[in-house]
Amino acid sequence: MITVRTIAELRTAVRRLRQEAEQQSDRAEVGFVPTMGYLHEGHASLMRQAKEQCAVTVLSIFVNPIQFGPNEDLAQYPRDEERDLKLAASLGIDIVFIPSPEEMYPQPTKTTIHVREVTEPLCGASRPGHFDGVTTVVAKLFHIVKPDRAYFGMKDAQQVAVIQQMVDDLNFDVAIVPCPIVREADGLALSSRNVYLSGEEREQALGLSRSLRMAEEWLREEPGLTAEEVKSRIRQVIGQAPLADIDYVDILTFPALQALPSDEPVGHAGSDVLIALAVRFGRTRLIDNRLFSRQGGRLCSVK
């Protein structure tokens, strides 16, 4: 495994390994997994899929400052480079890129990428400017790495939709590969921020995944339920946790992220449907979601 810290080193390493792969076979795709580090099994699942599908795999570890708001957890965001490198090596990653903020932003950036509409609901409403930071850094990384495929976890389904929109609109020559949410045995979605949770907060946070499982049951048993009725029931389930502070519970089409009419049955939606949550427990903000796709005339959960 090669560890590089500058853009020039990364470009040289990717070019060399791609050329070597081309000489050995006709399979020379570069797979890319962008992360902010503090890696867990969710990240590992992305890296495994990249290894299965691509000849060369690149992992980036970069806590991107421009996607954090002024009162968010940039300074406290968990970091463990040594552990991250051990995990990447154990999975056979070819190149790990760990730039400094000064390497990625040698001067204050005057160019940002702004994706409209799909950035406005959900986390975009409560974290203004967040997705401009995400799209800008991902665009930079795509230009630097030049991957054939890039792997993103569906835990942040809005991020997947935003990145796909950017790629489509700006003709990036990269395929976006959404990967399933990875959960703990008790259902909690894996997140680097889970480390912030106290024991009591973590126990109460299980209400997120529980409410999504219940929503799946409700929609299966009562297909006439409206979006407002489902959201109200989810809020009641999460609200049973005294420490839960709900940021949003929403039901939208996917990937357009347009609101469903409040009086229309969710089961009548003509597209995929996303139920998305964001809830704070103390200083920790958690997100989770469940995606439903139309199969055989009814909405079914996408696992």
Image (cartoon, helix red, strand yellow):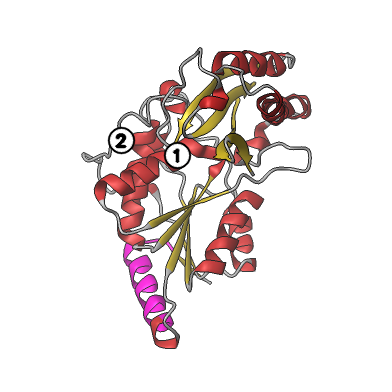
Which residue is located at x 29 percent, y 54 percent? 172
Instruction: Determine if the magenta segment contains residue 270.
Output: no
Amino acid marked by disc 2: Val
Secondary structure at badge 1 equals helix
Instruction: Determine if the magenta segment contains residue 19.
Output: yes
Q: Quadrant of the C terminus?
A: top right
Q: 104 or 291: nearer the eye?
A: 291
Q: Which portion, as a residue range, is magenta?
A: 4-21
Secondary structure at badge 2 equals loop
Which residue is located at x 60 percent, y 62 percent? 48
Which residue position is annotated with label 2?
115
**Left or right of residue 151, residue 240 in this image:** right
Which residue position is annotated with label 1?
159
Above or below for 191 versus 235: below
Q: Main secondary structure of the magenta part?
A: helix
Above or below for 2 versus 81: below
Res. 270 in view: yes
